[in-house]
Image (spheres, rainbow, N blue to C red):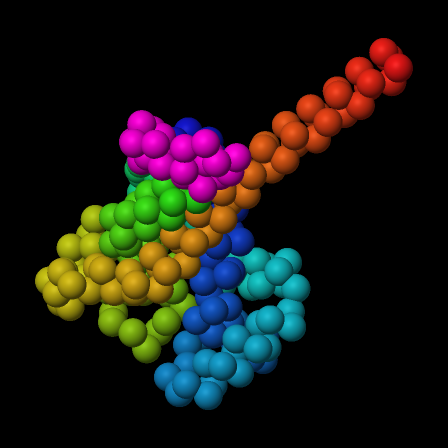
Amino acid sequence: GGSRWIAATAVAPLEVVRTRVQAGRFATDGGGVGATSAASRSVGAARAAGSRSVGAMLAEIIREQGYRGLFLGLNSTLMRDVPFSALYWVGVERLRDAMLRRGWWDGYHAQKPLTALVAGALAGGAAAFATTPFDVVKTRQQLSRAAHTGPAWMSRGEGLWATMGRIVREEGSAELLSGWVPRVARVAPACAVMLGSYEMTKVLWRRLREQQTLGLGCLLFR
């Protein structure tokens, strides 16, 4: 949890830039942060921002909103990422232990990588779903003040719980889970591949070391 807190804080400015580029919130003419209502203009803004350096976009945020603009949505990011890590790793350990006790792929050389793959996917998907409300709030806050055409409250820099409460009152509680399907579809496979690859690399490395040890033994006793 603590390491995730430090990592999320360190990369917060880059997360703000990424969110705004994907939403097309950087102006096409470089003259400031602005919102576009038409879909074609949003795509054009995103393409124009993609051709600019990250440093230029960070400087634009500082010029328009000050250094605090680099950390918009940090509280909601921490409330998303820190619980995500806790839920994910607890879930992985519980699921992996349960599968090993039940003898899943027992005797197979890739037992640990396969159990890690399944446990990573299930735990990652569950943690992603559980933390979706904070991801929604984070996105809203990071786009605030850059989205002048949106609701007035989005430009006032409201806090985490105030933003969440207002979303529930004005748009309904279901809005807090908007986008959970693509979020889970992205996070679950990513977690599965990461953990499965790690465990498979350990298996391959162990086999390589064993082969090297056997080869050295053959040379010594030839």
Q: Quadrant where the C terminus lies?
A: top right
Q: Position of residue 34 (x, y in %)?
A: 45, 75
Camera-side residue of 142 and 172: 172
Question: Residue 17: x, y in percent?
Answer: 51, 60
Name the residue: 69% across, 24% down.
210
Considering depth in this image, is 196 or 150 the residue closer to the camera?
A: 196
Residue 22: percent from left, percent from top: 47, 69
The residue at 15%/55% (across/down) is: 165
Residue 176 in view here: yes
- State the extent of the magenta-drawn residues as a range: 94-116
Q: Residue at x 64, y 69 (%)?
A: 52
Residue at the spot 32% in from the left edge and 46% down from the top edge: 122
User: Is residue 67 positioned above or below 153 on the image?
Assistant: above
Q: Quadrant of residue 132?
A: bottom left
**Residue 102 drawn in magenta:** yes
Q: Position of residue 57 (x, y in %)?
A: 58, 63
The secondary structure that most of the magenta stretch takes on is helix
Foreground pick, 127 / 5: 127
Q: Is residue 61 left or right of residue 152?
A: right
Q: Nearer the viewer, residue 126 or 163?
A: 126
